Amino acid sequence: MADAFVRPCDHPGCLAGGDFRAPKSRLQLHEYFWFCLEHIRAYNAAWNYYAGMNEAEIEAEIRHDTVWQRPSWKLGDRHGPAYADRIRDYFGVFAHSSQNGQTGSRRNSGSANEIARRVLSAREQALAVFEIEPPFTPVRLKARYKALVKLHHPDAHGGDKAAEEKLKIINQAYATLKAAYFG
């Protein structure tokens, strides 16, 4: 009968068997040191996963771990009442409903009173004006704002009152989105 293989402890000068594994570093979580009970206790007591990271990196790591490293959105943003209205159906896939043989868009199949009763929040209205979908950065929001202002500025339309009203709506939507997401 042969004796079972005994892995030596990785601590310098230790002759005991290395029965307990420990990751080599935060960046090498699948590579291990093997220690005896005494040295694994000392290693674990001194282990700091966040060593070498600043506060912003630690906060980002914690936030990333709370969703298991998966992308996420604010609750309700992707499935709110106005979400279907923001979908661009370039190929007309959702243009016809097969329910009861009716044609036309599902979201527009209700009566005019039903559509009028549906009131969107200020944030949802602002997202619809900007035709932008979260998550977005302040830089992306500002770039979209500048593009809309350039497109709808009254000076570009000969002082047209409708363009002036549209610009007021754009300015209000920009203020709403800045306050809702970055303020």
Image (tube, rainbow, N blue to C red):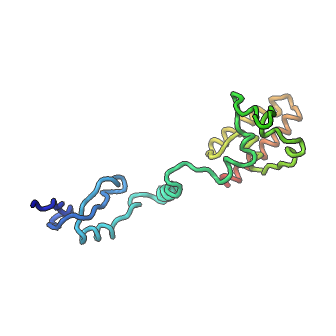
User: Residue 38, image x and y in percent?
Assistant: 24, 72
- Name which residue lies at 23% across and 64% down: 19
Q: Residue furthest left?
A: 1
**Vertically, is 31 above or below 147?**
below
Q: Residue furthest front?
A: 100
Q: Is residue 126 left or right of residue 65?
A: right
User: Residue 145, image x and y in percent?
Assistant: 71, 40
In the image shown, does 76 or 56 lie closer to the viewer? 76
Q: Is residue 48 left or right of residue 68?
A: left
In the image shown, does 22 or 176 lie closer to the viewer? 22
Q: How many marks?
A: 0
In the image shown, does 52 or 25 lie closer to the viewer? 25
- Name which residue lies at 78% across and 51% down: 121
Q: Is residue 70 left or right of residue 6?
A: right
Q: Quadrant of the C terminus?
A: bottom right
User: Residue 20, image x and y in percent?
Assistant: 26, 64
- Name which residue lies at 69% across and 27% down: 91
